[in-house]
Image (spheres, helix red, strand yellow):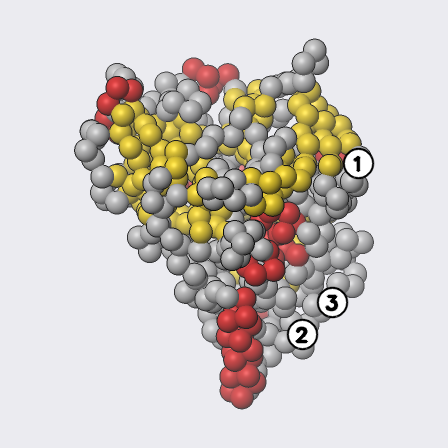
Amino acid sequence: MKSKILITGLLLSAAIIGGCSAGGSGAKDTMDHSKMDHSNMSEEEMQQMNGEMESSEMENGHMSHTNPLALNDSTGENELALPPLLKPQEGEENIYTITAQIGETEIFDGIQTKTLGYNGSFLGPVIQVNEGENVTFRTKNELDETTTFHWHGVDIPGTGDGGPHNYVEPGQSKDIKFTVNQEAATLWFHPHPEGATAEQVYQGLAGLIYVEDARSKTLDLPNEYGINDFPLIFQDKQFDDNKQLNYKLAHNEDGAIGDTLLINGTINPKLTVGQEKVRLRLVNGSNARNYTYRLNTGDEFQQIATDGGLINKPNKLREITLTPGERAEIIIDFSKYDAASDIALLNESGAILLPFTIDEQKSSNPSNIPTNLNDYMVTDEERKLPVSKKLELFGMGNMVAINNKQFDMNRIDFTQKQGETEIWEIYNKSDMMGGMTHPFHIHGTQFKIVSIDDQEPPASEQGWKDTIAIDAGETFKLAVKFNNKGVYMFHCHILEHEENGMMGQVEVN
């Protein structure tokens, strides 16, 4: 698995990124990377800008993204909280009510922290739906500010996608009706209002969606919620002296980074499991931090799914990296451990993310993971399609842009026909200091990675995706098809980059 470590690039002035302003006409569907050259700064200007960057980072109270603020180890003193399963509204078939609300949460013993949540004070529930169902998401806004409800990874009409056009004012409610038209997957939802996404997510607005289909229900995979099938929403936070989620303290133009990890909103978590195979649904719900997951024992685990569904066969790994917005499902075989075992999930720097406690009383007959999980493939026809859309990601801080433009709500950057597959070429342009990894997300669809730098993607990314981590200098080719009409966002999923303008719009007709 290639590294996805964030590398801070050079902060460039508006003169360097030509066309950085929010205005401008719509971009052509194809662009030549060679025509997107940028001027160089003098050594004196470089030193001045680097000094300003370091000063800004010190004021924000954390280190740069080259060497992000280290996470504290989990002490394992608190059992992991599980999001509640959301049931349809009583008396109504397939109507799910999701309310964004203000609350207080006891994250630290005896202290109430001001938070936001869906159907509760912090984070949200798991919505379970099935392929082929007609469902209604009844959304309500009980915040004191505008929000939206974005269904990240869901194949949904543009009017219900929850981008910045689909706002819900305080006190308002809105019904989102659609047919579930995708295979089994772990998806999520969060707000997406223009200029407020990063803070609202940081304060706690995030929930999960489980899609099941006929195939997934027949596979012998761990599927007992809270027994051998666990969602894990990873979010790093920075608390102030009063144990409050102080977004202004954590804010950085290249993404909020904190020193305290919450998993499902639990501080210092541990997870008690039986001596059996256990399924972990990993969700990177952080604003900007990457996580490389591995076991402290060095043992292998099996990946069974990407963002948008099951992969074809279990993929044995010793580590897997997720950038903001990405998900993966893995299975760890705990049958070979006992109550005395010291086993934990670590990150790339060795921080303890999640210690495991083995309960031998919960032992079960270990099942064999199926060798055939799905029939995903990139077709020969898709491989032969010409590139029809080129996107260049460039910059950092508040000088980020796509194709030399920053987001304009009134500008449509691309158009595409409903039901037609096109090849999108996404290039992350390096600068003189290297550049940053940009997690790139497209709304309203699941796409296929055709190639990375004209090579086959690694096995861990050979499955349906809605978010990809593009390292500086890399070029991805994606097979993208929209099954519905509407206007959809595409953007960097470092939430502060999205708000700084690293976002565009595609209209599907």
Q: For the residues labelled 3 and 2, say whether their Cβ atoms are less than 8 Å apart.
A: yes
Vertical placement of residue 256 versus 424, above or below: below
Vertical placement of residue 194 versus 137, above or below: below
The amino acid on which the numbered mark 1 sits, given as a three-letter code, is: Gly
Vertical placement of residue 342 versus 42, above or below: above
Q: Nearer the viewer, residue 250 or 233?
A: 250
Distance (Cα) linking label 1 and label 2: 39 Å
The answer to whether residue 389 is visible is no
Mark 1 vs mark 2, foreground winner is 1
Vertical placement of residue 67 versus 233, above or below: below
Q: Residue at 46%, 17% (x, y): give it.
A: 217
Location of residue 273 by image quarter: top left
| Residue ID for mark 1 | 171
Of the image marks 1 and 3, the number of the one nearer the N terminus:
3
Secondary structure type for disc 2: loop
The answer to whether residue 113 is visible is yes
| Residue ID for mark 2 | 14
Residue 31, percent across and down?
65, 61
Mark 1 vs mark 3, foreground winner is 1
Q: Quadrant of the C terminus?
A: top right
Location of residue 53 by image quarter: bottom right
Distance (Cα) linking label 3 and label 2: 8 Å
Residue 447, percent across and down?
55, 40
Q: Which mark is residue 21?
A: 3
Residue 209, percent across and down?
56, 30
| Number of other residues with Cα within 10 Å of mark 2, as a class: few under 14, some 14 to 19, many 20 or more | few
Secondary structure type for disc 1: loop
Of the image marks 1 and 2, the number of the one nearer the N terminus:
2
The amino acid on which the numbered mark 2 sits, given as a three-letter code, is: Ala
